[in-house]
Image (tube, rainbow, N blue to C red):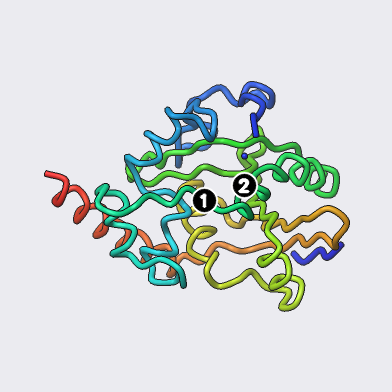
Amino acid sequence: MVWEGGCREAPLSRLGIKGRDVNTAYTVVNLQQGTTEWLEWRSNGIGASDAPAIMGENPWKSSADLLSEKLGTAEQFEGSAAMARGTALEPEARKRYEAISKVRVTPACLQSNKHKWQRASVDGLAANGSTVVEIKCGESVHRKTVSSRQVPSYYIGQLQHILAVTGLPGIDFFCWLPGLQEIHLRVERDDPYIARLIVTEQAFWQQLIKQKR
């Protein structure tokens, strides 16, 4: 282990998260990730996984590509076999994270109280809202993170977006694959980056709303 610092999920009530402000920065939305209702909620805002494209940090998708997707004018990406495998492995990875960190977490859908369009479907949130974790189970990200001992740059926007929504000072980044070395990194909040993120996301959101009319 290196310590440097989706399937059907259990409901939020498992950890005592009721659905209103665990932290005054956000509201917990009672949705199960992967459902039709969740997809609709996600499409009506900007999620953490949208942030890298909006910030120009996603090597596979531009801000214009994302805009076309949200406008429904681009072919929707259904996901790859690798992504499906990563989603299937996530519950086991979360159990491993809990065993190592001694913090019990559950998936949660969060919506910023200040910027209603700013949303995050997090892989793990502690019941008291003090800890949040992003879990990655892909071979590529695992290989890169083991090699560099750093979070790949194209995930920085995603992580800082989650910190913008939660108001937390940091987030855990946990990479896990069966039989391989697990990696647990701590990423601290970057307020100057978050300030730029919010301005850029807000401009993207306004452009999206304008073009939807």
In percent of width and height, residue 10 lies at 67, 26
Answer with mark 1 or mark 2, whichever residue precedes in sequence.
1
Q: Give above or below for 62 relative to 167.
A: below
Q: Residue furthest left?
A: 213
Q: Label 1, label 2: how many angstroms apart (C-alpha)?
A: 7 Å
Q: Which residue in the protein does label 2 denote?
A: 84
Instruction: Give residue 135's position: percent from left, percent from top.
Output: 67, 51
Residue 155 is tagged as none
Q: Quadrant of the N terminus?
A: bottom right
Residue shown at 38% from the left, 49% from the top = 76
Tell me what residue is drawn at x 52 percent, y 69 percent: 154
Q: Indicate the quadrant where residue 155 lies.
A: bottom right
Name the amino acid, label 1.
Answer: Gly
Task: Determine whether, in the image, residue 142 is placed left or right of residue 118.
Answer: right
Q: Are marks 1 and 2 in contact (CB under 8 Å)?
A: yes
Image-quadrant location for residue 82: bottom right
Q: Secondary structure at mark 1?
A: loop
Towards the viewer: 69 or 176: 69
The residue wearing badge 1 is 79
Residue farthest to the bottom, as pictured: 148
Image side of residue 26 versus residue 96, left or right:
left
- In the rendered structure, which amino acid carries the disc numbered 2? Ala
User: Which quadrant would residue 177 be assigned to in this image?
Assistant: bottom right
Q: Quadrant of the C terminus?
A: top left
* Residue 70 location (% of width, % of height): 30, 49
* Disc 2 secondary structure class: helix
